[in-house]
Image (cartoon, helix red, strand yellow):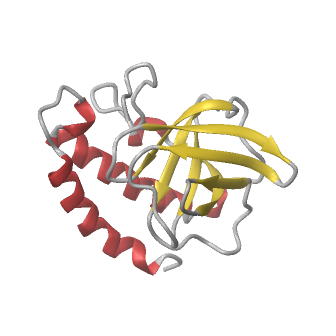
Amino acid sequence: MPFPRCRALGAGLFALAAAACGDDGNPENDMRCGLQAMASGNRVLDQFQAATTLMAAPPTGMMGTVPARVVGHGTATALVAEGPEGIVAGYEGAGFPLQPGFAVAIVDDSTEAFRGILIFETDGPADYPQIGTLSSAESTLPLYAMRAPWSQISTSECPLFRNLADATN
């Protein structure tokens, strides 16, 4: 298995989902959506391991302020721009991992629409095409891009990325 720590991550993510659940009016924090977010993160990892889903170039529509989330946390924002070495993105939210970690720009495979950046707290692949970096004040992670079956990882009741107009992280 290319990412041996990813399976162990699942159990920890379940605990994070349960701990993050609250009654603050944010649907990302209810138990059902928290568990779905964990399952969606695992589906993305499974799809990511299939090299056929990878993209070698940044997706269209990725510049500016975009939704981003660390698996196990709510939607936050990332500021994205083009740099000399590819995409340069700055994460503005909670839970950003120190090393190890990696981020994936997700594109809906049915519409080719960029949806957001999902961030994982595990080692990423060394041999996949990197489109840039995602940084916080404490660390910088490699950024990859992939096409994903959006209808399998996000629903209208529990979207993987909350609408930025509604996000308060």
Residue 32 or 81: which is nearer the viewer? 81
Q: Is residue 106 visible?
A: yes
Q: Quadrant of residue 36?
A: top left
Q: Residue furthest right?
A: 84
Please tell me which residue is depicted at 75% across the width and 47% down the height of the picture.
87
Q: How many marks?
A: 0
Q: Residue furthest top?
A: 165
Q: Quadrant of residue 121?
A: bottom left
Please tell me which residue is depicted at 61% across the width and 46% down the height of the picture.
90
Q: Is residue 148 visible?
A: no
Q: Is residue 4 above or below residue 22?
A: below
- Name the image quarter holding the C terminus: top left
Residue 40 or 97: which is nearer the viewer? 97
Please tell me which residue is depicted at 78% across the width and 48% down the height of the picture.
57
Residue 27 or 1: which is nearer the viewer? 27
Please tell me which residue is depicted at 29% across the width and 32% down the height of the picture.
158
